[in-house]
Amino acid sequence: MFTSHPIGFVSSPYQNASEVPKGLGAKHEADGVLKILPEFEPGLTDIEGFSHLFVIWEFDRSPREQLRGDDLLASPPSDNRQHGVFATRSPRRPNAIGLTVVELLRRDGVALHVRGVDMLDGTAVLDIKPYLSSIPTERLRRGWLAEAEARHRG
Amino acid sequence: MFTSHPIGFVSSPYQNASEVPKGLGAKHEADGVLKILPEFEPGLTDIEGFSHLFVIWEFDRSPREQLRGDDLLASPPSDNRQHGVFATRSPRRPNAIGLTVVELLRRDGVALHVRGVDMLDGTAVLDIKPYLSSIPTERLRRGWLAEAEARHRG
């Protein structure tokens, strides 16, 4: 068990969750900045060599609640059926942890200019890790999401 | 800020960090089980449709310490040079959060049988998310790691 503490904050165009593109075909191409706190700057050494980063962040606008039973089902914007929270990206989850892959456009000191933010402005960043490899698309199965897309295309 | 709590625990073949494959060319193909706590089982609904999952977990065998300055540089097993911790997968990081992509082989109730574990046996799982899409390999740059690989091939 550990208590999270921010290593920085996201500067994003989104002030409210309703502004973040969601649902089938939603694209995350918004530019933003990860502003890392000065005391963590040495941890950014050589990060500019990576094209993509995992950003681990905190759903700090979601209420803290003990989720049990049906609270662990989520109704994603991409489907009219409920699915288990661990099969979705719902913000309402037992640990309020978000994960986003961003493209690193450039680094300017403690400011990482990135593309692909889907976090709200001011979101606390907990960790950044280099994105090292991809699962080949032909090996991916995407369960209910692929089914919802197929129904949508009709 | 939030305090993490486990949603389950990893059953892995690795008892000690020294047993986990590391360094250039290391493959993570070990089979393991994510044993989710019974109270979170509804959150697994429909997860079996996904071939790959992000597992967010806790480096619970790493000491809790305030990392500042040079402590934020890591010496990865794949290179003889130091890099910022956010440009590495080092276990010694400001928030003790690990991230692993696993292949979901099958679900048996609260047991997710997966391939690709690199966590120690008994590691606390904090979150599971579906892996939905990949960055095309031809768009990835991998900085110091690609350079270390090139030097290694010599």
Image: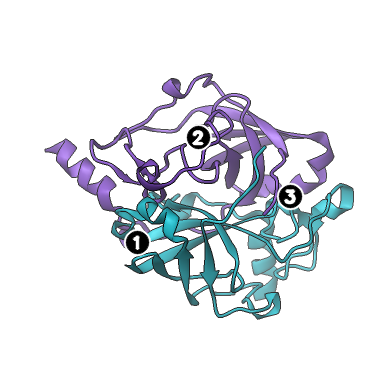
Chain colours: A purple, B cyan
Q: Is the residue at mark 3 from the same chain as the one at mark 1?
A: no
Mark 2: secondary structure: loop
Q: Determine the residue positioned at 88% across, 47% down.
A: B69
| 3 or 1: mark nearer the eye | 1
The three-letter amino acid code for the residue at tag 3 is Asp
Residue B135 or residue B3, whichever sits in front:
B3
Separation (CA) of disc 1 from disc 2: 24 Å
Name the residue tied to disc 2: A116
Q: Which mark is residue B118?
A: none
Residue B53 position, x and y percent, is 43, 57
Q: Quadrant of residue B119?
A: bottom right
> Which chain is indicated by disc 3?
A
Between label 3 and label 2, give the one nearer the viewer: 2
Left or right of B150 in this view: B12: left
- Residue A111: percent from left, percent from top: 71, 32
Mark 1 lies on residue: B51
Q: Residue at x 75, y 45 (%)?
A: A44
Residue occupied by mark 3: A46
Q: Give the letter of the chain under mark 1.
A: B
Dot 3: what SS?
loop
Crowding near the residue tagged with mark 2, few <14, some 14–19, many ≥20 C-alpha atoms within 10 Å: some
